[in-house]
Image (cartoon, rainbow, N blue to C red):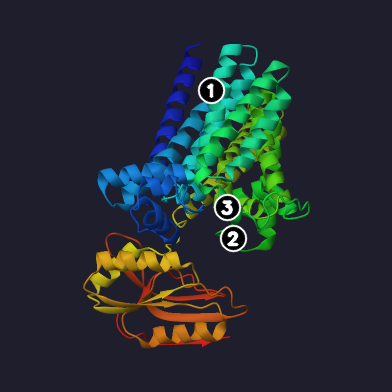
């Protein structure tokens, strides 16, 4: 009895120690990203909405995907209190993203167990998408938080369906959360509809009427909130909103769960198609096992973790662009990420537990069976270790700097540049205008010229590159992307690139990438020695 109690206490201490380390890693990795400069989408949000005031955010004359309204409101409050600061502007999204993982961790712990919750917490901490997008001046951190709260309230509504007062409270909170989530990020409407469909089939009689009333409440609130943007919203989505194209994107959408898990941990380091296919199959199997084992422990929770996200992907695959194409973008499906990671963690946890139990049961039995189970146990342990290790490898490389005016300013000041040119990739005029405003404020005494990189093909791109080779003190604002030129290779040698560090550690690199230059800020330490432009 005493030995068993001691073992339980030791296991509890180990669980909370690993949880604390995971939380620390989560916070440190996200905070490490928020002090870099604003990239083009963030700068559009800041210059076009936040800086112009609250009225511009909520009563804009156009519906802009750069303006995640609820997050912009929080960022505006931060801006009014602290002034212009990349850290404070991004803090609302960062806090929401971290709170989402903590809240879901405790929820899974209470409903499924410590191992499942801990595995989820570790995978969420290592999730490259989460590290990247919650550290931006965008509304994705709130998307994570609202997706977690929506699932919890849907789960409570199912559990409270026999208690009228508690059910009405749960469903009211659920409807308000869905409204806020859609107001912040409109593609969330697909997940909201999926949750309402699942709850409708779970509930009976008068509960369905109450659910329908809550759905009408969410729709009414969204309609009122979006009144300022209704006309421009219809124009923005006129390319295909509501058009049914059953074959469009459907297969690719249904393969998103394993693809997202692969992209989080493996794909960025592995180029082999065969190995990627193996991991794709492996992740798919673990997801299926996770759903199967989750149903054994809590059928309602298992269904909510799997069915609404699946319906969301199905609707996204059936609806034509923009909702169809938008929902396929990795960051636009962020509100599904934690569901996949939870199911994936459940599958690994149960597989791990079953093998461990077999090892324990065969300890005093047949030696050959015991050895076989030991090998199986270590094999699964190695698999979990590889997945986690891949997460560590990638989590340090997830953020590609784009359009970071702050780093460009540091570069100019560090090298005492007095005159320079700014080259733009093909992008809307707002990016060019935002950069002009930023540089005129930060560097009022420095002369510069703005140059746009046209879309009209290879000749123009080569001309731009050759100019960069000839001109001293030249760098690029925005990323210089040449992927629209097929079958081309460009070589840029001996350019210095801003790393994004506040310590101004500028590295000189040789960079060659087929079909595109992944560079962000190129500027010279003097004359560039050589550069080839080949086709």
* 480 over 249 or under it: above or below: below
The residue at 67%/36% (across/down) is: 194
Give the residue number, with chain letter if any, for mark 3.
Answer: 330
| Figure quadrant of residue 25 | top left
How many marks on residues? 3
Q: Which mark is residue 270?
A: 2
Q: Secondary structure at mark 1?
A: helix
129 vs 158, left or right, is left
Q: Position of residue 354 (x, y in %)?
A: 66, 30
* 102 over 299 or under it: above or below: below
The mark closer to the camera, 1 or 3, is: 3
Q: Secondary structure at mark 3?
A: helix
Spatial CA distance of label 3 from label 2 is 19 Å
Q: Position of residue 3 (x, y in %)?
A: 48, 16
Badge 3 vs badge 2, beta-carbon distance below 8 Å: no
Sequence-earlier tag: 1 or 3: 1
| Figure quadrant of residue 535 | bottom right
Sequence-earlier tag: 3 or 2: 2
User: Is any atom of residue 108 visible in this view?
Assistant: no
Badge 1 vs badge 3, beta-carbon distance below 8 Å: no
* 516 over 273 or under it: above or below: below
192 vs 244, left or right, is left
312 or 222, which is in the foreground? 222
């Amino acid at each position: 009895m005493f030995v068993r109690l001691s073992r339980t206490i030791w296991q509890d201490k180990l669980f909370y120690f690993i949880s604390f380390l995971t939380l620390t890693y989560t916070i440190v990795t996200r905070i490490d990203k928020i002090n870099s400069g604003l990239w083009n989408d963030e700068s559009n949000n800041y210059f076009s909405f936040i800086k112009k005031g609250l009225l511009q955010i909520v009563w804009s004359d156009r519906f802009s995907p750069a303006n995640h309204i609820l997050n912009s409101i929080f960022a505006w409050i931060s801006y009014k209190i602290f002034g212009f600061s990349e850290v404070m502007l991004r803090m609302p999204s960062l806090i929401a993203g971290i709170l989402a993982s903590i809240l879901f961790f405790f929820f899974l712990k209470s409903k499924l167990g410590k191992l499942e919750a801990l595995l989820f917490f570790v995978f969420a901490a290592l999730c490259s998408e989460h590290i990247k997008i919650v550290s931006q001046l965008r509304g994705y951190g709130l998307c994570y938080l609202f997706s977690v709260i929506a699932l919890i309230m849907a789960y409570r509504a199912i559990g409270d369906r026999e208690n009228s007062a508690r059910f009405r409270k749960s469903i009211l909170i659920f409807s308000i959360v869905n409204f806020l989530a859609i107001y912040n990020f409109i593609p969330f409407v697909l997940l909201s509809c999926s949750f309402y469909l699942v709850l409708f089939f779970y509930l009976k009689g008068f509960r369905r009427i109450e659910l329908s009333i809550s759905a009408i409440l969410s729709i009414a609130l969204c309609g009122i909130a979006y009144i300022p943007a209704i006309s421009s919203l219809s124009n923005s989505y006129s390319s295909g909103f509501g058009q049914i194209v059953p074959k469009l994107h459907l297969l690719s959408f249904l393969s998103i769960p394993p693809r997202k898990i692969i992209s989080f941990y493996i794909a960025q380091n592995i180029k082999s198609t065969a190995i990627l296919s193996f991991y794709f199959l492996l992740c798919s199997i673990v997801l299926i096992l996770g759903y199967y084992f989750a149903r054994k422990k809590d059928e309602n929770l298992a269904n909510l973790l799997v069915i609404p996200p699946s319906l969301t992907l199905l609707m996204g695959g059936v609806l034509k662009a923009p909702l169809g194409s938008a929902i396929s973008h990795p960051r636009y499906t962020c509100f599904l990420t934690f569901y996949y990671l939870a199911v994936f963690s459940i599958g690994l946890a149960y597989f791990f537990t079953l093998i461990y139990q077999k090892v324990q049961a065969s300890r005093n039995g047949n030696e050959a069976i015991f050895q076989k189970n030991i090998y199986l146990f270590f094999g699964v342990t190695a698999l979990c270790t590889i997945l986690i290790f891949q997460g560590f490898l990638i989590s340090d490389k997830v953020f590609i700097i784009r359009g970071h005016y702050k780093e460009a300013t540091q570069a100019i000041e560090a090298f005492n540049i007095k005159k320079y040119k700014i080259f733009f990739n093909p992008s809307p005029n707002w990016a060019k205008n935002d950069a002009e405003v930023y540089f005129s404020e930060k560097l009022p005494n420095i002369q510069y010229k703005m140059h746009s990189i046209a879309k009209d093909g290879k000749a123009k791109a080569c001309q731009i590159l050759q100019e960069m080779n000839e001109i001293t003190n030249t760098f690029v604002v925005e990323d210089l992307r040449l992927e629209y030129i097929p079958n081309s290779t460009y070589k840029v040698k001996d350019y210095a690139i801003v790393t994004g560090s506040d310590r101004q550690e500028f590295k000189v690199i040789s960079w060659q990438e087929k079909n595109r230059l992944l560079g962000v800020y190129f500027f010279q330490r003097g004359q560039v020695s050589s550069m080839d432009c080949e086709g």
